[in-house]
Image (cartoon, helix red, strand yellow):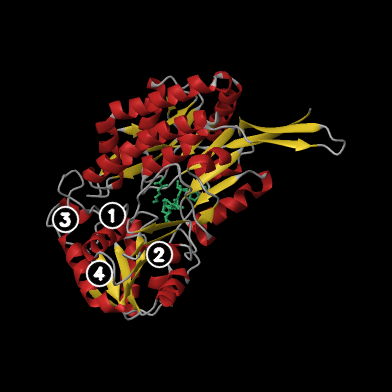
Amino acid sequence: MKVIQNYIDGRFVSGKRQFADVNPADGTLIAQVTEADDAQVDEAVNAARRAVQGEWGRLGIRERTSRLHRVADAIEKRFDCFVQAEVADTGKPISLASRLDVPRAAANFRVFADLVKMAGLESFQAETPDGAGALNYAVRKPLGVVGVITPWNLPLLLLTWKVAPALACGNSVVVKPSEETPATATLLAEAMQDAGIPRGVYNVLHGFGPGSAGEFLTQHSGVDAITFTGESKTGAAIMKSVASTVKPLSFELGGKNAAIVFADCNFEEAVSGLSDAVFLNTGQVCLCAERVYVERKIFDSFVEALKRKAEGLHPGWPSDEKTDLGPLISAQHREKVLSYYRLADEEGATVITGGGVPKFGDNRDQGFYVQPTIYTGLPESARCVKEEIFGPVCHVAPFDSEEQAVAMANDTKYGLAASIWTSDLKRGHRVAQQMKVGITWVNCWFLRDLRTPFGGAGLSGIGREGGMHSLNFYSELNNICIRL
Ligand code: NAD
Ligand code: 6OD
């Protein structure tokens, strides 16, 4: 049986305990994974500290960024290995991993390497009270050791989204990938070795959250900052855990995202865009739309068209190029999603399509598939409309005016993303600016420019990453004031 090890100070190391890495498509065992204990967390943090104080910390920006480009080269060289590992761990369709997850991992390293090289210094010339001048300029320094904790839905994409800017700014990292998806973070260690990243700069610890590697990392006094993506309630637990050591936190958390579809939209584009927004990655993207508001004039035809899209999806083996709907990540997560399908019935929803589990008649019946599902007819106060489900499911409700649509979309404690579908550009701008979220798309969804701010309001997070926002989070600014 394959064993996935921790990666500490440039070496793959085993430990005392192991846990199972399961393929969600059929429930089979992929590997045993080494769980890091508190001593290994300590070793990794100390190795990361030595790295920033040693060779890595002394490298000039040109050499540092050129090595990050080499990490991207090494990912591209091992493209198929990364794709296969990600597909096996997550159950996502191979077509998705090949066009999104793995290319984006390489792009994260290239973009942040170039960005940090181009970033100028902030400077201000001022006048002192006695009439002399003063020059202020800020220099960017690494924070030190960054703890990176990531979820299972886009494992490599989300890990590199944090690791690349952290390293570009000169930090070292200790990463704790999700226990569900340990493989690609471990493969990335091999890419780091190929690229000449010094030992200790990139460390990987496997394990769980509370009482395991995740919590040990957040509590460690040698960690200078924590960047976390995951559920809002985990964010709250981490916030408590780091309180006594006071460190910067970046939180990208959950969502209950809305889409607003106006009658003047390009109907085909909106249906197709919404089908992606609801069902991509089996609905397991934090940006997915679980609440769809459609102008009453086109409500029935829109629901019918979205139903046809859902029923046209091809659930299958993740390694089959034709598959566009994989399983959910785990038996436990499937139980959570199915509990919302049952709740929707209890809350009085009309089931437009789905609501159950598909039958394949082969080993996929031991996997964690659910049907893509559309509901209508729930009141806005229903739990299924208020709580994040994180599956291939949405509730569609009609609206009669722009004001009503905006009010319904904003009636949530989350605030991650929204999409607006209209041919009236003025309305697009007007409505977009009223959305209480961090990211709004007009006539598109999940179209990403890595230089733009990314993050959420309310329960969806704290702070922004992306572009200069990442550089600002992963560095400490020292303002220097010189009397002239
Ligand atoms: P999760 O919060 O259960 O776990 C995320 C990571 O945190 C895992 O590595 C886990 O082991 C670790 N963890 C759990 N408890 C911890 C603790 N007490 N201390 C330290 N680490 C701990 O999330 P998940 O189920 O892996 O991911 C799905 C969630 O992530 C959804 O809510 C989704 O919306 C959210 N998400 C948000 C974004 C975003 O950018 N806003 C992106 C992807 C996923
Ligand atoms: O595209 C990204 O950079 C990003 N952070 C996506 C997050 C998706 C959430 O599941």
In this view, the mark in front (2 or 3):
2
Give the mark nearer the N terminus: 2 vs 3: 3
Answer yes or no: is residue 258 visible.
no
Q: CA distance from mark 2 to mark 3?
A: 37 Å
Q: Looking at the image, which is closer to me, 190 or 398?
A: 398
* Residue position marked by numbered label 4 in the rendering: 355
Residue annotated with mark 2: 426
Disc 2 residue type? Lys
How far, Cα to Cα, is label 3 from label 4? 16 Å
The answer to whether the residue labelled 1 contacts the one labelled 2, judged by CB atoms less than 8 Å apart, is no
Tell me the amino acid under the disc marked 3: His
Q: x, y (%) of residue 317? A: 18, 48
Give the quarter of the figure containing the C terminus.
top right
The amino acid type of the residue labelled 4 equals Gly
Task: Determine the image quadrant of residue 293.
Answer: bottom left
Give the structural element (helix, strand or loop) at label 4: loop
Q: CA distance from mark 1 to mark 3?
A: 12 Å
Q: Residue 185 occupies which quadrant of the picture?
A: top left
Check the image and name the residue furthest to the left. Answer: 361
Q: Position of residue 177 (x, y in %)?
A: 43, 41
Residue 280 numbered tag:
1
Q: Could you tell me how far apart the alpha carbons at marks 1 and 2 are, in whole angstroms?
A: 29 Å
For label 4, count other residues whose C-alpha is less than 10 Å away and answer few (under 14), some (14-19) or many (20+).
many
410 up-or-down from 381: above or below: above
Instruction: Give percent across and percent down for residue 73.
Output: 34, 25
Residue under label 3: 314
Q: Which of disc 2 and disc 4 is earlier in sequence? A: 4
Q: Secondary structure at mark 3?
A: loop
Residue 88: image location, x then y, percent? 26, 42
